[in-house]
Every structure is written in C-alpha cells, then in structure tokens.
Amino acid sequence: MVHHISLLEVKPSVTPEQLESIMVETRIRLLKIPEINNLRVGKRIEVKTNPYTYFFSMDLENMDKLKYAQESAVYTQFQKQVLDPFSSKITSFNYEMEPGKDVRYS
C-alpha cells in the first residue's frame, strides 16, 4: 500500500474563501477516481512555521495505481483547473505503508 502526500503553497492572491473552495474541489474531484483510497485534505494550523498552505493525501494499492490515477482525465483536469491556477509550489512524497515490503516493488 502506497501513501501519497502533496504539500501545496498557494499563491498570495488566494483568499480564505478560495482556499475553502480548493479544498472542497479537491475532495469532490479526487474521490471520483476509483483507485484512490482514504483521501485526506487539510489546511495548515501553524502559519509562522509551516510554508505549506494545504495538503492532500491518499492511499493507493501500488505505484502503478498512483501513476494511473495521476494520468486519468479526472486528475489531469483537477491539476489544470484547481492546482495550477492557485498553487505556487507543490511538493509530493510517496511512502510504502506495509512493514517488511521492499519499496522497489511498491
């Protein structure tokens, strides 16, 4: 099982209302992709120590499912309409969640 997390810095022009809308859109759109499990979306609490305004994370069966999800039409549209216009920086990480599993085979 792979856990993918994306940390996003939004552009300075993004209002609190727009951020709320981005979070809702993230949930609505990504939950349409059947390969995505356990989607989480949140906004930062510690403004002074955390440069990332919001995050989304999801679990997928393996890296192939992650690639498939990210290449899907739904994700591509989400990226073009939600992430790209409002994000100034996106940092993503992937983690293997099964103890003892060789990450080369995730």
Image: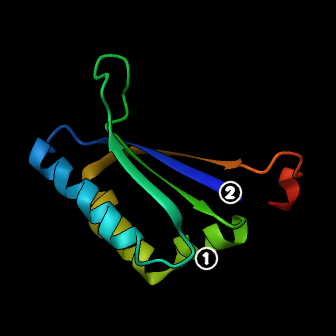
In the image, residue 18 sits, relative to residue 77, either above or below, namely above
Residue projecting furthest to the top: 48
Residue, disc 2: 2
Report whether residue 10 is seen: yes
Q: Where is residue 79 in the image (x, y as percent from the top left)?
A: 38, 66
Q: Name the residue under label 1.
A: 68
What's the mark number on residue 9? none
For mark 1, give the secondary structure. Answer: helix
Is 28 situated above or below 74? above
Q: Who is closer to the viewer here, 46 or 8?
A: 46
Q: Is residue 84 left or right of residue 101?
A: left
* Picture layout, residue 77 above or below residue 48: below
Residue 35, image quadrant = bottom right
Question: In this figure, which colouring scheme has been used for the structure?
Answer: rainbow
Q: At label 2, which amino acid type do we have?
A: Val
Of pointers 1 and 2, the one earlier in the residue sequence: 2
Residue 16 x/y as whole percent: 12, 42
Q: Are marks 1 and 2 in contact (CB under 8 Å)?
A: no
Quadrant where the C terminus sits is bottom right
Residue at the location (53% across, 69% down)? 36
Label 2 neighbour load within 10 Å: few <14, some 14-19, many 20+:
many
Look at label 1 and name its amino acid. Answer: Tyr
Name which residue lies at 43% across and 73% down: 75
Q: Where is residue 5 in the image (x, y as percent from the top left)?
A: 53, 48
**Helix or strand or loop: what does disc 2 sit on?**
strand
Question: How many numbered discs sit on the rendered protein?
Answer: 2
Residue 1, position in %: x, y? Answer: 71, 59
User: Foreground: 17 or 100?
Assistant: 100
